[in-house]
Image: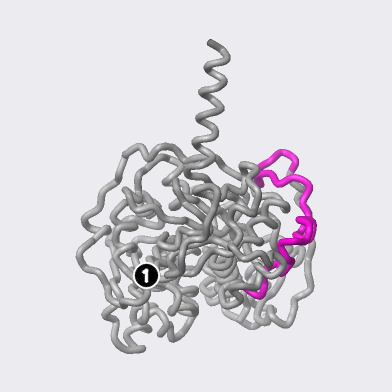
Amino acid sequence: MRRLLIIISLTLVTFLAKSQKIEYFNDLMSDMYNFAIYEPAGYDPVNSTDMPVVMFLHGRSMSIGLDGYRYGTIESIKKEFDILKGQPALVVEPNAKGGEGWGSVKLHKVYEFLKAHYAFDHNKFYVIGMSMGGWGTLNYVNKYPDEVAACVGICGGCDAKSPCGLNKVPTWIIHAADDETTDVACSDRVVEAMKACGSTNLLKYSRLESGGHSLINYFQIHSLYEWLFKHNRTNRRFDTSIDFVNNHDYPRYWSGGKGPSVYITASELAKIQARTPRQQGSAPIASNSGTNSSNNGNSPSTSKPTTNNTSSSSNTSSSNKPSTSNTSSPSKPATTAKPVATVKPANSSTAKPNTVTVKPVSSSDKGIYIVKQGDTLKKIAKKHKIKYKKLLQINHFTKDKKIKPGDKIKVA
């Protein structure tokens, strides 16, 4: 009987490994944010070119000691809410560290990594976020409008004075008038600035009377994702058939479990970087298995292109592979990636001590001040001849914001 239970357990583990899973990329690539990727059951990282992608950006409170993975799309899936309801999708969640904020260029490197090493429908890439993530969403889409099919920015704003890029993308902005953390005026300004850019037929602004700054339930609503998936990058129109703000559902359906969590190591990263997903419209690449699971010991050869020239496989789609990612050839040993001894969750008891290393400000950090011992926000404002309220506004800070040495503060 015991042997039978062991066999059943092993069979179940094998089934889960081949179904949905969550991969965590922590401290492996210095030129981009840490991030997590949710892969639905049946996903093939080489051949699933019809898969949509949702990028979720968390708020500032999730940047401090909580890894960013505490609410949002992946968390809703982990809670077994069937938010996708029969429409499988990849979900990528970058993780900004405390005081770091969202940088559009650095976020784009995460997207380029995904584009180079995971198969998905490039015409169905969506960005959503709340609070700091709402700012990050609108900033990112404004800078890269030609790559985004639709976006939802909640309780945020946009740093651009003329966010005309947003006018090109179906954009849904949501903000509550009683928000005491991020003033609703931040979203009001974005909407007025978009009107100054021209037609806003791709914009919807839901200015709520109440709700405060806690609107995370929207990420548990199936109809939000249903609205996103109605849009395609090649067909620019705003779908009006779904109103997830006024007519929403909070699903409580079992989705089959979250699947295993996989913390990617340097050697597993090398396998992922070695594969080249097929392009949309091309013939499927032959594989010995339906999916390529980087955590179950499969050889990366099951997901390589059919060409025998493996030394050049990392260059066969140079238009998609980011120049910032590791350019090591698949034939090189895995140690060419950034070495790590053991990749553990950030809340591990063996985490590094709380020390601060202040790096010099580079030429690319103009307008950024690095907090020193004894600094306060008012002292920083006075030193850089900027009004205190203006300093809070451009950094999306509240009056009770606490800073520490090493934090980066916008001063221009």
- Residue drawn 40% across and 40% down? 80
User: What's the coloring here?
Assistant: one colour
Q: In this view, does 332 lie to the left or right of 261?
A: right
Q: In which quarter of the image is residue 130?
A: bottom left
Q: Where is residue 360 in the image (x, y as percent from the top left)?
A: 79, 73
Q: In this view, does 104 lie to the left or right of 49?
A: right
Sort mark 1 into few (<14), some (14-19) or many (20+) by Cα contacts within 10 Å. Answer: many
Task: Please say whether residue 233 is one of the residues in the magenta stretch.
Answer: no
Q: In which quarter of the image is residue 362?
A: bottom right
Task: Please state which of residues 190 and 128 is positioned toward the viewer in this rendering.
Answer: 128
Indicate whether 308 appears above or below 69.
Answer: below
Relative side of 343 to 276, left or right: right
Rendered-image quadrant of the C terminus = bottom right
140 is higher (above) or lower (below) than 219? below
The answer, for residue 44, to whether it is visible in the render is yes
Query: Which SS class for mark 1?
Result: strand
Residue furthest out toward the top: 1
Is residue 195 left or right of 267 when viewed as pictured?
left
- 253 vs 119, nearest the viewer: 119
Q: In this view, does 387 lie above or below 109?
A: below
Amino acid type at mark 1: Ala
- Which residue sits at x=54%, y=61%? 118
Farthest residue in the front direction? Answer: 308
Across and down, in percent, residue 152 comes to 38, 66
Residue picked out by circle 1: 150
- Work out whether residue 125 or residue 164 is closer to the camera in this orientation and state it: 125
Residue 157, percent across and down? 43, 72
Q: Nearer the viewer, residue 168 or 69?
A: 168
Residue 180 on image: x %, y %: 42, 61
At 37% from the left edge and 84% from the top edge, which residue is drawn? Answer: 193
Stretch of the chain drawn in magenta:
322-350
Most common SS among magenta residues: loop
